[in-house]
Image (spheres, grey):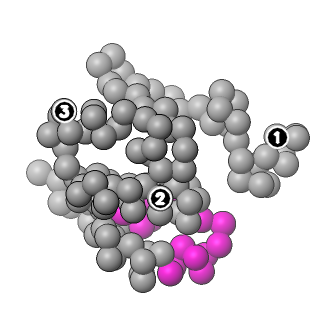
Amino acid sequence: MALSSLKAAGLLATGHTTAEIHPALTPQPGDVVVTKQRVSAFTGTNLDVILRSNNIDMLLLTGILTQGVVLSTVRHASDMDYRAVVVADGCSDRDPEVQRVLMEKIFPFQARVATVEEVIGALP
């Protein structure tokens, strides 16, 4: 499948240049990197162990394909008693109506929905 087809389908292969971490976000020495294996960031990874061993119980969630990755991770995090904040303008989906329904009607039952500006404003 051509790169243009992958982009059009919303799929990127691991290791492809378009799936790399932006240089401004390059992990630094001592940073923990978790490679997601499934739709939820928790499934098939040691993310829960890393978070709990560092006494982290609140998550800020952003991402693409809100109806898949973000939704699955929010639900998984909620089931594991994490406090989750979905950063609404830090998420995107191919379907604007699905995005709206998730942010307005689904996520508020298991997470707080906030904007980037609200999150930054809440930082100490």
Q: Residue furthest top?
A: 29
Where residue 105 appears, as percent x and y from the top left, is 42, 83
Residue on which disc 2 sits:
72
| Residue 3 numbered tag | 1
Q: Quadrant of residue 112?
A: bottom left
What's the CA distance linking mark 2 and mark 1?
26 Å
Label 2 vs label 1, nearer the camera: 2
Residue on which disc 3 sits:
53
Disc 2 is placed on an element classified as helix
Image quadrant holding the N terminus, namely top right
Disc 3 is placed on an element classified as helix
Magenta-tinted stretch: 86-101
The vertical placement of 53 against 121, above or below, is: above
**Kind of residue at badge 2:** Ser
What's the CA distance linking mark 1 and mark 3?
39 Å
**Kind of residue at badge 3:** Ser
Q: Residue at x 36, y 21 (%)?
A: 28
Of 102 and 44, which appears nearest the observer? 44
Q: Residues within 10 Å of mark 2 (few under 14, many from 20)?
A: some
Q: Residues within 10 Å of mark 3 (few under 14, many from 20)?
A: few
Q: Residues within 10 Å of mark 1 (few under 14, many from 20)?
A: few
Q: Confirm or deny contact between disc 2 and disc 3 (CB under 8 A).
A: no
The vertical placement of 34 against 122, above or below, is: above
**Kind of residue at badge 1:** Leu
